Image: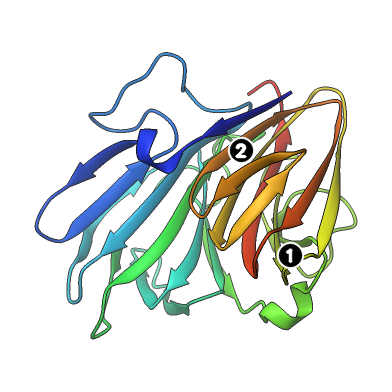
Amino acid sequence: MVEVRRFDDLGGFENDWLTARHHFSFGHYYDPKRLGHGALLVWNDDTIQPGRGFDLHGHRDMEIITYVRKGAITHRDHLGNEGRTEAGDVQVMSAGKGILHEEYNREEDATQIFQIWILPNATGVTPRWEQRSFPKAERAARLVPLASGRKGDEGALEIHQDAAVLGATLTAGQSVTHELASGRSAYLVAAVGRLKVDGQEVEARDGVALTGPASATIEALEDSELLLVDVPAAP
């Protein structure tokens, strides 16, 4: 099954420094039909103005993956971790038994990120943070694991779930196929470009919800950059 969720229909929040669109219920946005997709709980599309960001706050028992679409985000936490993640790269925070952190745009221009929350398959783990560069050229015409808890996904940032965040870059006319097993769910968003997913056209920042078993063909109608999250269908 394929369900397209148009960007203009997403929930949202805006103030003087943050413009956020929510693919699933989050904060003050609540839609009983959009309470996540399997173990995927949150997919936020955030634009953060220069010099602003999320002040120190806490999380626990959540795998939080940040994909930077434009600019860079600077992380700092109570464990002493600090780092700057640039466009195209990924950071993972396993909140575990509890972590306090802040996220700021220290750049001169607006930063755009996808923030993805996945429910873990283990609670109370030791919290951790890590970032990694993933050159877009290495994702050309194929889905590459960026963050994963699946066996065999070498080179990906580790998460505590039988799930994977996959990235691909496609030139116009190229396609990839993703096999989704029974008992699995997937969610797909193009950061840039325009796609056709099993015959349905989707624009950048639209969401595509997939339910297995399925074999999804993803074709680029123009040069595109996409993320796909494959998770257990049951949280």
Residue sitting at 78 percent across and 70 percent down?
Answer: 155
Q: Position of residue 60 (x, y in %)?
A: 43, 40
In the rendered structure, which amino acid carries the disc numbered 1?
A: Ala
182 to the left or right of 210: right
Q: Position of residue 113 (x, y in %)?
A: 42, 62
Q: Position of residue 194 (x, y in %)?
A: 60, 57
Residue sitting at 63 percent across and 44 percent down?
Answer: 201
Give the total number of marks visible in the rendering.
2
Location of residue 3 by image quarter: top right
56 to the left or right of 43: left
Q: Which residue is mark 2?
A: 208
Q: Callout 2: few (<14), some (14-19), or many (20+) C-alpha neighbours within 10 Å?
A: many
Q: Split into 4 quadrants, where in the image is the C terminus?
A: top right
In the rendered structure, which amino acid carries the disc numbered 2?
A: Val
Task: Indicate which label's residue lies in the foreground, 2 or 1.
Answer: 2
Q: Position of residue 179 (x, y in %)?
A: 88, 41
Q: Callout 1: few (<14), some (14-19), or many (20+) C-alpha neighbours within 10 Å?
A: many
Q: Secondary structure at mark 2?
A: strand
Eyeballing the image, is 148 above or below 69?
Answer: above
Eyeballing the image, is 120 above or below 73?
Answer: above
Q: Split into 4 quadrants, where in the image is the N terminus?
A: top right
Furthest toward the left, the residue is 16
Residue sitting at 86 percent across and 24 percent down?
Answer: 182
Furthest toward the bottom, the residue is 108
Q: Which residue is mark 1?
A: 156
